[in-house]
């Protein structure tokens, strides 16, 4: 079985990107066998590093509570079979941060958040990840949460993402730059649980790792039965657009200036972006979940318009979330819910050929007919 990643169209207002688009069309597509997801052929050019162990960034950080050894086990093996290198950043208990009044950012309303303060732990963990970027003087790093999942072909699709981001920055896709993703960005929002299609310039491409179904019925609740059968329909996908996604054919991925992404499944920070993020969301003020605040910062909303943030998002997301089999209380670190309800099969949302759901086949060799058939979470 083969899949391809090809350029579909680059939609702009005006003709300023015409020369860059011609250069991009000279970059040939690659055909990659599903049976060898971690063996990537080298290809000379400015995007080679997107296929390295840190996906073209200097490091990959995973924010995780130290006591969630179950999640750390999962992320460790997923990264290993994907040829990725990760470093864990300790997360925090929201209650501990809430009770440490001196450490709370200006503007945080303790009274208003008394019953919903657990998200503070998430905020502080991501602040610490950004802090490491600054302290270690990294040019960039990808930050993920510990319940994420990605397609086995992630490394083969990121070169196109890098090309699209470069075009949106006005940079040539053929120049050798410090970063394969360009030199003028703060945040690359690769993993989210929802985003909208903006009206400005955007880069669209065909990518068979994008599920063709835009909003399949949420049937996760049916996965709690005792017959060990998978759900009858695929997990839900974030809507491609709040406007009209039908203007693009199935298997389309869009790269654009970030509009309103939510959730922090995976995002990259440049050194510049890390400094801006800590200044704005810790030193200046904060009074909402970190993904909301970060989205406001990218859009310059609610008084966060002074730092000229340059954020780009992928739509749909490259990185999804995984809900492991077992007691459903494992799904969250924020409180206790679902205790006693047993999920018989893990579920990954928004990822077609999930690494996590195909681990057994990948560990056996990953060759169809030898390691076992690879599961397509969103078959056409």
Image (cartoon, rainbow, N blue to C red):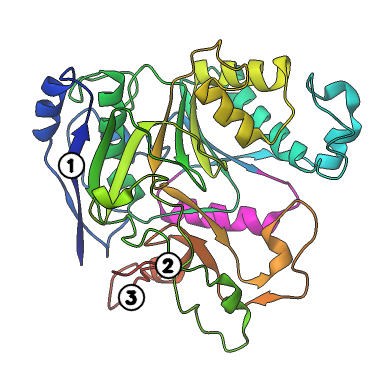
The residue that label 1 is drawn on is: 7
> Which residue is pictured at 38% across the width and 49% down the height?
240
Q: Quadrant of residue 330?
A: bottom right
> From which residue to which does the magenta span run?
64-84
In the image, residue 264 lies at what x, y percent? 56, 41
In the image, residue 204 lies at what x, y percent? 25, 40
Say which mark, if any, is on residue 32.
none
The residue that label 2 is drawn on is: 358
Spatial CA distance of label 2 from label 3 is 9 Å
Of the two numbered discs 2 and 1 in the rendering, the one whose residue sits closer to the viewer: 1
Spatial CA distance of label 2 from label 1 is 28 Å
**Nearer the observer, 40 or 356:** 356
The residue that label 3 is drawn on is: 373
Can the viewer see residue 294? yes
Specify whether 112 is left or right of 371: right
In the image, residue 28 lies at what x, y percent? 11, 40
Spatial CA distance of label 3 from label 1 is 29 Å
> Which residue is pictured at 18% across the width and 38% down the height?
9
Of the two numbered discs 3 and 1 in the rendering, the one whose residue sits closer to the viewer: 1
Quadrant of the frame with the N terminus: bottom left
Q: Are marks 2 and 3 in contact (CB under 8 Å)?
A: no
**Nearer the observer, 39 or 142:** 142
> Which residue is pictured at 69% across the width and 36% down the height?
289
Specify whether 201 is left or right of 290: left
Q: Quadrant of residue 50?
A: top left
In the image, residue 253 lies at what x, y percent? 30, 46
């Amino acid at each position: 079985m083969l899949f391809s990643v090809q350029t579909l169209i680059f939609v702009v207002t005006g003709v300023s990107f015409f020369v860059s688009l011609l250069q991009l069309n000279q970059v040939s597509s690659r055909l990659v066998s599903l049976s060898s997801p971690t063996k990537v052929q080298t290809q000379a050019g400015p995007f080679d590093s997107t296929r390295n162990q840190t996906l073209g960034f200097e490091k990959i950080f995973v924010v995780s509570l130290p006591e969630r050894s179950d999640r750390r086990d999962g992320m460790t093996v997923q990264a290993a079979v994907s040829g990725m290198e990760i470093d864990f950043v300790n997360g925090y208990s929201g209650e501990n941060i809430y009770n440490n009044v001196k450490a709370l950012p200006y503007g945080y309303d303790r009274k208003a958040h008394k019953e919903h303060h657990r998200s503070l732990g998430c905020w502080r963990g991501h602040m610490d990840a950004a802090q490491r970027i600054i302290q270690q003087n990294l040019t960039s790093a990808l930050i993920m949460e510990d319940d994420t999942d990605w397609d086995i072909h992630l490394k083969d699709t990121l070169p196109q993402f890098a090309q699209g981001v470069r075009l949106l920055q006005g940079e040539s896709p053929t120049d050798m730059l410090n970063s394969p993703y360009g030199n003028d960005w703060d945040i690359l929002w690769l993993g989210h649980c929802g985003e909208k299609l903006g009206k400005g310039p955007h880069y669209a491409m065909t990518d068979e790792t994008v599920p063709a179904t835009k909003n399949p019925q949420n049937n996760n609740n049916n996965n709690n039965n005792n017959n060990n059968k998978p759900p009858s329909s695929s997990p839900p996908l974030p809507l491609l657009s709040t406007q009209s996604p039908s203007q693009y054919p199935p298997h389309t991925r869009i790269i654009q200036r970030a509009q309103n992404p939510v959730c922090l499944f995976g995002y990259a920070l440049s050194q510049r972006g890390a400094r801006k993020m800590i200044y704005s969301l810790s030193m200046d003020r904060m009074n909402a979940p970190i993904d909301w605040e970060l989205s406001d910062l990218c859009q310059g909303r609610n008084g966060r318009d002074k730092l000229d943030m340059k954020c780009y998002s992928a739509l749909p997301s490259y990185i999804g979330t995984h809900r492991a089999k077992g007691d459903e209380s494992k799904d969250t670190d924020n409180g206790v819910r679902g205790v006693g309800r047993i999920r018989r099969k893990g579920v990954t949302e928004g990822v077609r050929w999930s690494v996590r759901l195909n681990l057994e086949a990948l560990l056996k060799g990953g060759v169809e007919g030898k390691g076992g058939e690879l599961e397509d979470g969103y078959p056409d």
